[in-house]
Structures are given as C-alpha cells and as structure tokens.
Image (tube, rainbow, N blue to C red):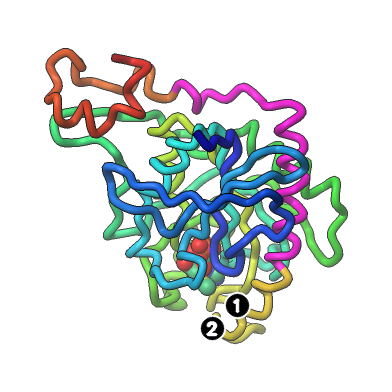
Amino acid sequence: MTEAKIGIIGGSGLYQMEALQDIEEVQLETPFGSPSDAIIVGTLEGTQVAFLARHGRHHHLMPSELPFQANIHAMKQLGVEYLISASAVGSLKAEVKPLDMVVPDQFIDRTKNRVSTFFGDGIVAHIAFGDPVCPQLAQELATAVASLNLDQVTLHQGGTYVCMEGPAFSTKAESNLYRSWDATVIGMTNLPEAKLAREAEIAYATLALVTDYDCWHPDHDSVTVEMVIGNLRKNAINAQRVIQAVVKQLAQNPPASEAHSALQYAILTPLSQAPEQTKEKLHLLLKKYL
Ligand SMILES: CSC[C@H]1O[C@H](OP(=O)(O)O)[C@H](O)[C@@H]1O
Ligand SMILES: Nc1ncnc2[nH]cnc12
C-alpha cells in the first residue's frame, strides 16, 4: 500500500512538484467522492510525500466546486499526518507585499457554500478550532522560509486569512471591511480544508503566497487574473523550495501535534448508538475510537 506521512496541497500556480522522484499517480476513491485529481506520491529529499493539485492539474475546479472532503479523506487514506497547503492570496496590509510569504495563524469564514465537516447523518462532533492551524507545523514552515533567505521575499509569521466564497474577487467595500478587522490576507480555499483536516486529525498549516494587493490599495490597480498569474510563477518556484526544506525538517524531527488527537473529546454521539451506515462511512476517521 502506498503511504506518505507528509501531504502537500498545491493551489493556484502550484500544479506539480518538480523535485519529486519515483513518482506514482494514485487514483483514490472516497466515501465523499473523488479528489480534485490523482494524488502524486513520490520522494522528496528521500522522504515519501503525497501531492495534490487543489484545482486539478489543469485548474478546472472553482473554489466553490472543490471536493474538500474527498481531498482530505484521500490524504488520510495515504496515512498523511502533516498537511501543508500552498495557496495564492491577496494582501490586506501595505507591509505585506506581492511575493511575500505569510504563515497565517487565524482564519475568518466568509464562505457561503462549502461543506466543512465529515460529520452529520447521525454522528455529531464539534472539534476545537480556536487555533485553526497547527502551531508546530506553522513554525516548521516559518523556519524553512527563514532558512532560505529568498530574494525579494519577506516572511510574515502569523496573521489572519479571510476565506471568501468567490469566484469574483472582493469589492472595495469588502476589502476595506476586512482591513478594518485587521485581517492580513484573503483567499478562497483554506478554511474548509483546515476544518476537515482537523476532523481527520491531520496537522495542517498554510504557506500563503502573496500575488496582489486585492483592490483596496490606492496605488495599485484592482486585482485581476493577469496580475496574479505573473506573481504565481515566481511564487511557485519559491514555494517548492520552502516545501522541500520543510519536508527535510519534518522527516528528521516530526513534531507532536494536538491535531493528531482532535476527535478524542469532540464526538457527542455515543458511537454504540450511531447508525451503522454512518460509522462505516466515517470508519477511517473513527476506527481508533470504536
Ligand atoms: C488565481 S487567484 C484566485 C484563486 O487563487 C487562490 O487559490 P488557492 O488557495 O488554491 O491557491 C484563491 O483561493 C482562489 O481560489
Ligand atoms: N485578492 C485575492 N482575493 C481572493 N483570493 C485571492 N487569491 C489571490 N489573490 C486573491
């Protein structure tokens, strides 16, 4: 059985990891449907990792169409314990410039149409989510960025990621509202993923790669895809270097994470009373508690 303890979800601009060796394409099915694409399992720095292009390798899925449950379930099937998201974001702060990197430690949910839980159908669970990002994995990301001294890149450790529905970018009024909330960056994908990863007891952290100043900045044009694409290419190269460094660190010293036991006190329904069909559907997540 193909396995990997470290998973990577590549967002806009990061559709493959060039340094991956001994690649195997794994086409997985889950009780929640098919993931965005085949998962590419290969070795990086001698360590087995699993890579998934969030929007598909040809970017055919909108944020609202992403099969978040299937993506996280597929990573869990492969044995992933640490999941790194690389994501394009707009900046909501003057000092956070395009090409900078942010390792957020908070999220604000502005989505309207996302499924962000595996539970329901007779089994109720409420995971703790006060700290939505694994602090240990976030620290590994920050350490890796700092170790590389990347040209033109400032690292911002901590910050709030606003997750909006999209696909249209924000209005100026919305962008300024998020600025008044002291939010740092904006994107369309990471919050459902972080919630589902926590339910799956996978440590999750985001490497947010800044592509633009959204639309609030008086000295910059409002965000367009054309603007974003130029910076995505540079960001994708930097992101791969960071991920490679993190994988090396994690392989040498995998940190303990509270995320790995997130369900321990979260399930309210006595599993002895729960519907068999739901227990079966959630077996991968629940098996250690059955
Ligand atoms: C190409 S700009 C908008 C698009 O990029 C981000 O995606 P991801 O988080 O997967 O890198 C943002 O969330 C939007 O989906
Ligand atoms: N300005 C922005 N708003 C939402 N998602 C983004 N992804 C990249 N830039 C973005």
Q: Amino acid at mark 2?
A: Thr
* Percent of width and height locating residue 202: 49, 33
- The answer to whether the beta carbon of the residue marked 1 is less than 8 Å from any atom of ligand 1 is yes
Q: Does the Cβ of the disc 2 residue fall within 8 Å of ligand 1?
A: no
Along the line of sight, the residue nearer the viewer: 175 or 54? 54
Secondary structure mostly seen in magenta is helix
Is 288 above or below relative to 195? above
Three-letter code, disc 1: Val
Instruction: From the top left corner, tell me how far across and down residue 95 is, in percent.
Output: 72, 64
Res. 100 in view: yes
Q: Is residue 27 above or below residue 255?
A: below
Residue occupying image coordinates x 39% and y 41%? 73
| Residue 85 in picture, x, y percent from top left | 56, 50
- Label 1: how many residues lie within 10 Å, few (<14), some (14-19) or many (20+)? many
- In this figure, which residue is indicated by the disc labeled 1? 228
The C terminus: image quadrant: top left
Q: Nearer the viewer, residue 35 or 215?
A: 35
Q: Please say if 279 is above or below 55.
A: above
Q: What residue does disc 2 label? A: 224
Residue stretch in magenta: 235-261
Residue 179 visible in the snapshot: no
Asked if disc 1 and disc 2 are in contact, CB closer than 8 Å, the reply is yes
From the viewer's perspective, is 30 left or right of 145?
left
